[in-house]
Image: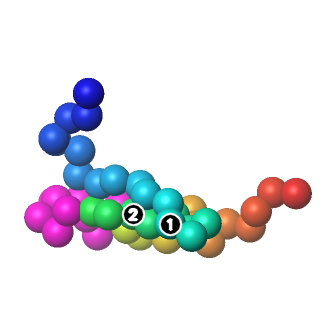
């Protein structure tokens, strides 16, 4: 059972990860900065 209190969902479409985040979540900006930094890391080989 999924909780309605989750601020974001991670979905996949066409081999891409998409973060769907609530516009009213208070920590949205900080979370997006962290997410973008993680996505910028090189893929391990």
Residue 33 badge: none
Say which quarter of the image contains residue 29: bottom left
User: On the picture, is 15 further left or further right than 12?
Assistant: right
Q: Is residue 5 above or below residue 10?
A: above
Say which quarter of the image contains residue 6: top left
Q: Where does label 2 land, which residue?
A: 19
Q: Residue at x 81, y 57 (%)?
A: 44
Q: Secondary structure at mark 2?
A: strand
User: On the picture, is 3 further left or further right than 20?
Assistant: left
**Viewer-proximal residue among 4 and 15:** 15
| Disc nearest the viewer among 1 and 2 | 1
The overriding secondary structure of the stretch rendered in magenta is loop
Q: Which residues are magenta?
A: 22-31
User: Is 2 contained in the magenta span?
Assistant: no
| Res. 18 in view | yes
Q: Quadrant of the N terminus?
A: top left
Q: Residue 45 at what x, y percent from top left? A: 88, 57
Q: Where does label 1 land, which residue?
A: 13
């Amino acid at each position: 059972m999924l909780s309605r209190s989750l601020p974001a969902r991670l979905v996949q479409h066409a081999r891409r990860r998409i973060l769907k985040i609530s516009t009213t979540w208070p920590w949205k900006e900080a979370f997006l900065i962290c997410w973008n930094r993680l996505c910028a890391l090189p893929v391990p080989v």
